[in-house]
C-alpha cells in the first residue's frame, strides 16, 4: 500500500469539509467517504485525529456525549 503525502491528505479533508458546509468531519466519516484510512495519517504525520484536524485548520470535534 502506497503512503500518501501529508498535503494530499489535508487537501482531501478540506474538500470533504467544504462539501459538507465547512463543518469538520470525524475520522469515521473521513475514512468512509474518502477511503483514506488511519494507516495513511496516524503516526507518520500526526499522532492523533485532533492533531490532524488542527493541521488542516479546523478545530477538533467535541466528543459525542451519552
Image (tube, rainbow, N blue to C red):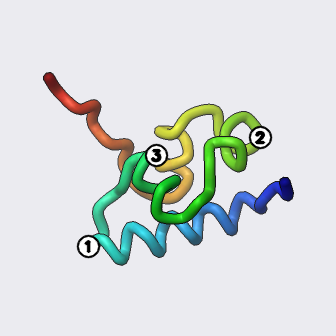
Q: Secondary structure at mark 1?
A: loop
Report the mark closest to the observer, 1 or 3.
3
Q: Which mark is residue 44?
A: 2
The disc, 1 or 2, on the residue closer to the chain's N-terminal end is: 1
* Residue designated by label 3: 27
In the image, is 65 to the left or to the right of 18?
left
Q: Quadrant for the C terminus, please.
A: top left
Q: Position of residue 23 (x, y in %)?
A: 29, 62
Query: Of the residues tagged 2 and 3, which is closer to the observer?
Result: 3
Extreme-left residue of the structure: 66
Residue 40, relative to residue 7: is it above or below?
above
Label 1, label 2: how many angstroms apart (C-alpha)? 29 Å
What's the mark number on residue 21? Answer: 1
Q: Are marks 1 and 3 in contact (CB under 8 Å)?
A: no
**Residue 10 position by quadrant:** bottom right
Name the residue at 67% across, 46% down.
41
Instruction: Classify 10 Å Cα crowding around label 3: few (below 14), some (14-19), many (20 and above).
Output: some
What's the residue at 54%, 40% (across, down)? Answer: 51
Residue 38: x %, y % from top left: 62, 42
Of residue 37 and residue 62, the one placed in the foreground of this image is 37
Amino acid at each position: 500500500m502506497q503512503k500518501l503525502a501529508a498535503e494530499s491528505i489535508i487537501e482531501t479533508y478540506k474538500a470533504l469539509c467544504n462539501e459538507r458546509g465547512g463543518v469538520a468531519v470525524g475520522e469515521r466519516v473521513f475514512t468512509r467517504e474518502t477511503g483514506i484510512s488511519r494507516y495513511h495519517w496516524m503516526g507518520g504525520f500526526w499522532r492523533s485525529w485532533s492533531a490532524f484536524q488542527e493541521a488542516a485548520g479546523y478545530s477538533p470535534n467535541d466528543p459525542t456525549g451519552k
